[in-house]
Amino acid sequence: MPTSAQARKPAFAEAGTSRKHRFPAIAMPDLSYTLEVAEETAAAYEKVSHIIPAIEWPAYAPYVKAINDLKKERNAVILAHNYMTPEIYHGVADIVGDSLQLAKEAARSEADVIVQCGVHFMAETSKILNPDKTILMPDMGAGCSLAESITAADVRGLREKHPGVPIVTYVNTSAEVKAECDICCTSSNALQIVESLGAPRVLLIPDRYLAANVALQTDVEILTWEGACVVHQRFTGEEMREYRESVPGVKIVAHPECPTDVTAEADYTGSTAGMITWVQKNKPEKVLLVTECSMADNIAVETPGVDYVRPCNLCPYMKMITLPKILESLVHMRDEVVVDPQVAERARSAVERMINLKG
């Protein structure tokens, strides 16, 4: 299975001659922290002032201004996952959300260029849904432990082993894996997708913990793969109980990629979008978000008065995306995501079945 940027290289390509003609060269902008930069980024900093120290903002602000200026020139839109750092999430992102929200927005985008601030399977999904658009990945080494846990050959093997059993593939997978499945799902709609198939047995791959959490909510027999998220698999039920004892009154909000002993201790379990909505609606005095820790920083901006207890498991892949890399990607139009057209066509069917499912 692929475990490195080099192994994933066929999914990406440097800028080709025809694209360079469409997107003329632009010089790297001046990155000095001037009064003009301070004034133009003041509103962005006000949002994150209680998260990013004032002494750090002059290092971010020139990139924020330069990226926002370049987006207009390139007719580009930036999609940012909820796990991006605050200076990206609140400073330059046009659309933020979980993987389902970003997939839908990618399908609706009218921009010529989509910059995917997330991990590589998200960029591939944007390309699958937008074959005629330029999809840029600021760091093509930003992978995913789940996506790397399974290959297209593995999926074909599962079909042979379980003939006639529908295969639901988590979006946290490569385009080649999506092309081998019947329909995709995200953490927010996995249960709905599984039950929509009307089958007594369903393969839900590759996250064994998402599958286990779905199995607790349905009579459908769930078969799975032994993949897991490098962030969520580290949490334990014992850790949750220790937090409840040490932080009286804390509410625990968990992601379904966590083990079932973690979700059993949670007050709410759902996708990153669901977790955000739950906190915004319930406004708990103290909350523990059992997921990647940058999300607490991002939603703290929009939920004053909520005290976030931070276990802070970082995703090493998400943190590979930075403001300098976003700027360089837009300036040089490099690290373009490409997907084999035949693979993309088959994968697109699975992704569109998910997006078009009513409910």
Image (cartoon, grey):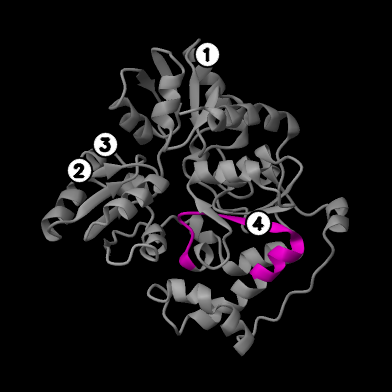
Q: Is residue 213 magenta?
A: no
Which residue in the rendered view is the most extreme toward the top? 164
Determine whether 85 is above or below 100 in the image. Answer: below
Q: Position of residue 113 (x, y in %)?
A: 72, 53
Task: Give the left or right position of residue 275, taking residue 45 as reference.
Answer: left
Span colored in magenta: 67-86
Q: Earlier in the sequence, mark 2 or mark 3?
A: 3
Look at 42% across and 62% down and name the residue there. Answer: 298
Q: Nearer the viewer, mark 1 or mark 4?
A: 4
In front: mark 3 or mark 1? 3
Q: Which quarter of the figure has residue 24?
A: bottom right
Secondary structure under tag 4 reads: strand
Question: Looking at the image, which residue is at 17% across and 47% down?
Answer: 238
Residue 77 numbered tag = 4
Name the residue nearer the viewer: 241 or 219: 219
Is residue 189 among what the camera can see? yes
The residue carrying mark 2 is 265
Q: Mark 1: which amino acid?
A: Glu
**Can residue 34 be seen in this snapshot?**
no
- Amino acid type, mark 4: Val
Label 4 packing within 10 angstroms: few (<14), some (14-19), many (20+): many
Sequence-first tag of 3 and 1: 1
Report how far apart the C-alphas of labels 1 and 4 lie in the structure.
41 Å
Question: Few, some or many C-alpha atoms within 10 Å of disc 2 (few <14, some 14-19, many ≥20)?
Answer: many
Front of the two marks 1 and 2: 2
Residue 60 point in image, percent of width and height:
55, 76
Using the image, tell me which numbered label, if any, was put on residue 260.
Answer: 3
